[in-house]
Amino acid sequence: MPDIDTLMQTVGRAARDASRYMAAATTARKNAALTELARLVRDRRDAIREANAADLTAARAAGLKESFVDRLAVTDAVIETMALGCEQIALLPDPIGEIKDMHPQASGIVVGKMRVPLGVLGIIYEARPNVTIDAAALAIKSGNAAILRGGSEAANTNACLGELVALALESADLPAKAIQVAPTVDRAFVGAMIVATDYIDVIIPRGGKSLIARLQNDARVPMIHHLDGICHTYVDAECDLDMAVSVSDNAKTQRTSPCNAMETLLVHAAVADVFLPRIGAVFAAKNVEMRADERALTILTASGLTCVPATEEDWETEYNAPIISIAVVDSLDAAIEHINRHGSGHTDAIITTNRPASDRFLREVDSGSVMVNCSTRLADGFVYGLGAEIGISTGKLHARGPVGLEGLTSLKYVVLGHGEGRH
């Protein structure tokens, strides 16, 4: 195996060369590759499951948390979702080459903007092998090349999926090297990627705090990052209580490990005495540990439910586990203040029948996705109709929230003239 710097140069040059072909690729070819990739994912499901079984066995032998193993697993449902994502992306309009906002100027020229690929994406992720297909599909349709560096725990699965992507690209006469799974799981390769300004145009990390902190400190390549998923649901004074119970239950327990699962439940004092015993009973039945502030603790324990006092740390913790923080607030203002102070800018929801309250929540909560009367678990590129997502950006520059096709493009000015010059 060559040294890491040589390996990065080899992979990077191939990606840069392939990116020029991808930028010029027709919509028909890109869609053909995506359609073939969907077929391959379904047809090779046994090979995918076999590779994934090896990763799962190794993960459990290493004593990794069950929530991590859950994210690592590729079930038949995950395989079908990957295939459907490819097909949905193929059906989406191709953003590349779109020209818009053409305006004539006093000089006689016409000025507008064209949507173009970013170039080469460096995608660094942990645990979830489905990101390999989601990222590849989005990169293909958006005319980008990509270098995918998944976690070592999913090395077998990612390698298997990477082979399918290469086959799909070749079937559409597109360069197989347009999408490359990193040829090593050595962490030093991540360090090489994040400074490879000659080869990579943007880094997109999907991982935990330690990974993001490292990249923020060391990266020289621009980054679209995803920090914590500290998602809130606020149950307003005016609400449908049955809906509030159903949505809160789904947001926390439908699946506890993803980043869009609710971690903090805020309840208006006007409905706390009625609502908290109901949702508390649901959580208790599903073995969700409740960590409550003083007022919530009093109500829940008086109802015979077991919970523990919340600490300040709880309000800023992404559990990715069957644990929920609960607080009682006196007003919408207090709920918004709590979310903006303790949240991570990921996804937050309000349950209310009061239109002015929902309008204020939408305007004032500073997050990538803000929801009314639905579960935070719906914050997902596939659910939003993006086909798939390459990640959820909690930053504010370039892309925010689920990053789909448009988030992987940029704009350049186009100017149409008739012989004009500067005077």
Image (cartoon, rainbow, N blue to C red):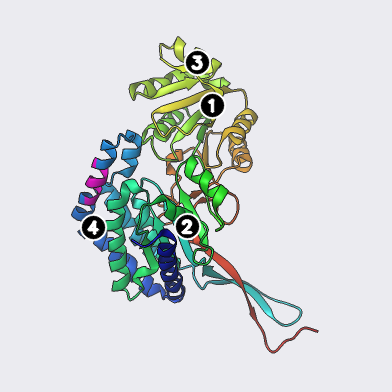
Instruction: Specify whether 334 is left or right of 18.
Output: right
Q: Earlier in the sequence, mark 2 or mark 3?
A: 2
Disc 1 residue type (three-letter): Glu
Dot 2: element: helix
* Kind of element beneath mark 1: helix
Residue 162 falls within the magenta-colored stretch: no
* In front of the other: 329 or 201: 201
Q: Which residue is the site of mark 3?
A: 297
Q: Is residue 412 visible?
A: yes
Q: CA distance from mark 1 to mark 2?
A: 34 Å
Q: Residue at x 38, y 56 (%)?
A: 134
Q: CA distance from mark 2 to mark 4?
A: 34 Å
Q: Does residue 75 show up? A: no
- Residue assigned mark 2: 192
Residue at the (26%, 46%) spot, across then down: 55
Query: Nearer the viewer's eye, disc 2 or disc 3?
Result: 2
Is 280 or 169 nearer to us in this picture?
A: 169
Whether residues under marks 4 and 3 lie with C-beta atoms below 8 angstroms apart, the answer is no
- Residue lying farthest right? 423
Residue 209 numbered mark, or none: none
Q: Earlier in the sequence, mark 1 or mark 4?
A: 4
The single residue placed furthest to the bottom in the displayed view is: 419
Per the picture, the main secondary structure of the magenta-coloured stretch is helix
Asked if residue 56 is among those painted magenta in the image, a careful observer would answer: yes
Question: On the image, numbered disc 1 is attached to which residue?
Answer: 313
* Residues shaded magenta: 51-57
